[in-house]
Image: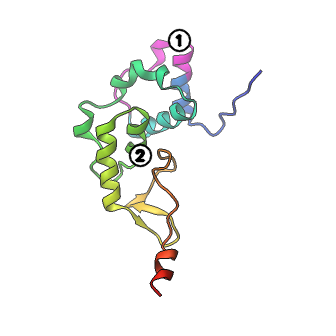
Amino acid sequence: DMQIDCQEDNAEALLVLLNIAHLKFSKIPTHVLDDNLLYNLAILIDQYQCIDLVKTWKDDWLPQPIENQRGTGRGTEGWVFIAWVFGLEKLFEKIAARLVRTIRTDGKGKLYVGDPLPRVMPPGFVGTFSLTPLLSSNL
């Protein structure tokens, strides 16, 4: 038997996935989800590699037209991960371009865009960042 430790998983997002997996379709949301739940769902979909499981509900959960409604203002940094997980290329590019133009560091290597970046981002999206090599090379 294989056990999966899901203690760290967001309970609401996990329940959505489990309801789908257990064919409890009447308990699956069929409306636009709030940003927080979408972000947590994206984390679990990526973690458990189950994008095919949720494809049926993707259009119900995401506001339409997605490219016109998300990714332009402060507080939408989590949408870069949502866009990446759900394969929304244009939205991903739009948010990524904004992040590149507005990203800052606290001097200790922590990245901010007004607020700290979300804890989960697409692989390789944010690398190790340090001002130390830049500063020491100018001395």
Which residue range is magenta in the image? 18-33
Which amino acid, mark 1?
Answer: Leu
Q: Residue furthest bottom?
A: 139
Residue 99 position in % (x across, y down): 35, 55
Disc 1, disc 2: CB below 8 Å? Answer: no
In this rendering, the answer to whether 94 lies above or below 57 is: below
Q: Residue at 74% x, 24% y: name it.
A: 2
Q: Residue at 43% x, 40% y: name it.
A: 36
Which amino acid, mark 2?
Answer: Gly
Residue 59 position in % (x across, y down): 33, 24
Between the residue at mark 1 and the residue at mark 2, the CA separation in whole angstroms equals 29 Å
Indicate yes or no whether the magenta region holds residue 55.
no
Q: Residue furthest front?
A: 137
Please give the residue where the numbered disc 1 appears in the rendered image.
23
Indicate yes or no whether the magenta region holds residue 19.
yes
Which disc is residue 119 wearing? Answer: none
Please give the residue where the numbered disc 2 appears in the rendered image.
78
SS of the residue at dot 1? Answer: loop
